[in-house]
Amino acid sequence: MKLVRAELERLGARRFVQLMLVLLVLASAVTAMTTLVSSHQPAPDEVVAAERAAAEQRQALEDEYRRCVAAVQGSLPPEEAESYPDDCSAFDPARRDRLPVATDHLAGVFTFANEARPLLYFLVAFLVLFGFLVGASYIGADIASGGVVSLLIWRPRRLAVLGAKLGTLLGALALLTVLATAAYLGAFWLIGQLAGLPGATGGDFWPSLGLIWLRGLVLVLLAAAVGFAIATLGRRTAAALGAVTAYAVVWELGLRVVMEVINAPRSANWMLSTYLDAWLTGEVQIIEASTCQDSAGFCGSSYQLGWGHGLAVLLALAGTLTLAAFAAFRRRDLI
């Protein structure tokens, strides 16, 4: 417990951590204030007009689906039918995530139910960056400055020291994520109540939002572990930053372009961003560009990757790097 308490004090005393916390608060405050200033509670005539527009949009979706079905059945003229695919499921309003509602047509009105998901994704993205950078600098600076060596003189058990550092980091990040999410979403919920609309927050709204948050929490912890592990292996904070930069430029950008040029099948399966998307959103649908029919503009095949695929890849990556970091830290010279 003394070791964990000492690591908590060291983590909280780091200027970089304090700077990132200030940036988190400032970014959240600026976003909330901008939303508050630009939003207003709608007048009754605005609500009526928005409900009418939403009803017209829903009717248009129904009409388009009926035309697609008629085209498949041969009831439309050939020149009109050729613009529709053989499968009308993409036009079926019942298969949409959500149908148009009145709040979609209210300009200058913040609706919490409509904006909660993108706001939460923004917070998760910032916390992932926060976790990776703090995790890398926390151990990288200690190794580079000789702080780890000094700590080992007091507690000469390498794996226990490194484990305490990693555990303290992950625990602090989990607590920060809980507090930051509660304050962040709470502020926007108040804005929706006082200067906008709460929207439809019943049904599965809160459970689905909680699931996104839980996935985000796991992603934050995995990002911190990856940053911590790479910096441990490279003995420098810059090693983690360089590794991520090199991966993004060489693999995510360079290799993606090469695979598109050679028309490689299922090239998205080789990209870490695909599994990040699958884990965070629950499922990602990938369209095979090589099977697209250029004449009609539709692609003939697609496949899905679920959250299980994403979690498996992310856990394998973080686990492998963490085990390698502990193995290297246990054996090598730290001076």
Image: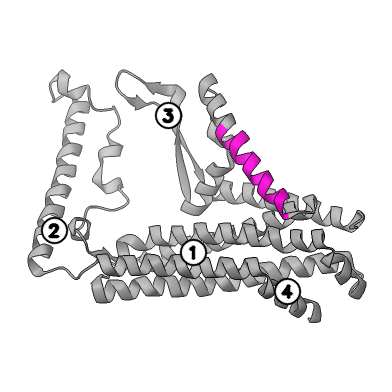
Does residue 298 appear to the left or right of 317 in the view shown?
left
Q: Of marks 3 and 4, which one's residue comes earlier in the chain?
A: 4
Residue 245 lies in the magenta stretch: yes
Query: Which residue is at 13% across, 25% downward?
Result: 76
Mark nearer the viewer, 2 or 4? 4
What x and y, as percent, mark residue 161?
Answer: 83, 68
What x and y, as percent, mark residue 225?
Answer: 68, 58
Tell me if residue 254 comes above or below residue 41 in the rendering. Answer: above
Amino acid carrying label 4: it is Arg
Amino acid carrying label 1: it is Trp
Q: Around disc 2, counting alpha carbons within 10 Å, would you say few (fewer than 14), some (14 to 19), or many (20 or more)?
A: some
Distance between the alpha carbons at the discs numbered 4 and 1: 28 Å
Amino acid carrying label 2: it is Ala
Magenta range = 237-253
Q: Around disc 4, counting alpha carbons within 10 Å, would you say few (fewer than 14), some (14 to 19), or many (20 or more)?
A: few
Mark nearer the viewer, 4 or 1? 4
Q: Secondary structure at mark 3?
A: loop
Distance between the alpha carbons at the discs numbered 2 and 3: 37 Å
